[in-house]
């Protein structure tokens, strides 16, 4: 009786273990790489909309609506900047600046006829990289101040190019390039460049922000800084 019970117990245990092994094998994926596969994604930054003033001038607008857009932002809106507007009667439109619009400046948009309306306007902010100053602080070291002048949006990674040039020929005597760096809105960063100048004549400094043209900016003109005027003094 004891042997029969023991045998029965052993058979029961074997059955349980066998069933467990079958279940384990069934739950094991045949291709382990399927579990470790990843999906790469790219984060696209959302645009930063900055509101500016929009007013109904109150004049007769039976032929066309002429809302007045005023730059109430903390920065100049540069030529080529696109302004968007919409009115309470369902009208809307865009205007591309034909010239720089300083803070407080106004420009007139045009839409469908309509007198009794209110309106609002905005633009998409972009970074504005510029060189605040650049100079040689010793015979072998240069100092540069880089700024993102836009107060609303940061600037992604870009590099600064430094050049030391001869005053008489504008030939490049020495050059250096910074590693890529990012700036938050309004941020100023100080950079130091080691410069070897095997030249005894008079020189001037030229510096270019966003040297590789990686950043789409509101103003591309102020990326280039030159001390050439110092050559005549």
Image (cartoon, rainbow, N blue to C red):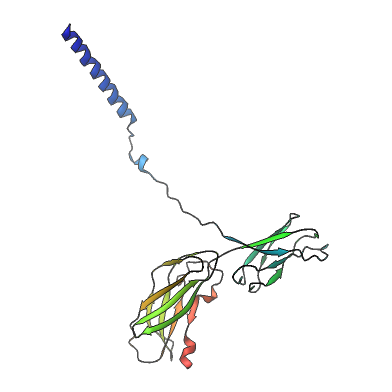
Of all residues, the one furthest to the left in this rendering is: 3
Residue found 51% across the figure and 57% down from its top: 45
How far from the left and from the top, in percent, is residue 62? 83, 62
Above or below 5: residue 84? below
User: Is residue 128 rendered to the left or right of residue 15?
Assistant: right
Q: Nearer the viewer, residue 58 or 20?
A: 58
Residue found 23% across the figure and 19% down from its top: 14
How far from the left and from the top, in percent, is residue 48? 57, 60
| Location of residue 81 (image quadrant) | bottom right
Residue found 63% across the figure and 72% down from its top: 103
Above or below 52: residue 138? below
How far from the left and from the top, in percent, is residue 124? 59, 62
How far from the left and from the top, in percent, is residue 86? 70, 58
Number of marks drawn: 0
Residue found 63% across the figure and 65% down from its top: 82
| Location of residue 141 (image quadrant) | bottom left
Q: Quadrant of the N terminus?
A: top left
Of all residues, the one furthest to the top in this rendering is: 1
Q: Nearer the viewer, residue 73 or 176?
A: 73
Q: Nearer the viewer, residue 204 or 149?
A: 149
User: Is residue 96 rendered to the left or right of residue 204?
Assistant: right
């Amino acid at each position: 009786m004891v042997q029969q019970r023991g045998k029965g117990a052993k058979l029961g245990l074997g059955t349980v273990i066998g069933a467990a092994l079958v279940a384990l094998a069934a739950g094991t994926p045949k291709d382990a790489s399927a579990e470790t596969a990843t999906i790469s994604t790219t984060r696209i930054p959302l645009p930063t909309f900055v509101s500016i003033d929009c007013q109904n001038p109150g004049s007769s607008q039976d032929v066309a609506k002429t809302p007045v857009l005023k730059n109430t932002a903390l920065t100049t809106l540069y030529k080529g900047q696109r302004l968007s507007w919409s009115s309470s009667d369902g009208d809307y439109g865009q205007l591309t600046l034909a010239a720089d619009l300083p803070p407080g400046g106004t420009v007139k948009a045009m839409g469908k006829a309509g007198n009794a309306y209110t309106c609002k306007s905005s633009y998409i902010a972009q970074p504005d990289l510029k060189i605040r100053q650049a100079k040689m602080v010793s015979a072998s070291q240069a100092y540069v101040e880089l700024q993102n002048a836009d107060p609303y949006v940061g600037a992604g990674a870009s590099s600064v190019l430094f050049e030391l040039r001869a005053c008489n020929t504008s030939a490049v005597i020495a050059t250096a390039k910074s590693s890529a760096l990012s700036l938050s809105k309004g941020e100023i960063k100080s950079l130091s460049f080691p410069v070897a100048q095997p030249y005894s004549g008079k020189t001037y400094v030229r510096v270019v922000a966003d040297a590789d043209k990686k950043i789409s900016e509101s103003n591309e003109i102020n990326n280039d800084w030159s001390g050439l005027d110092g050559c005549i003094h």
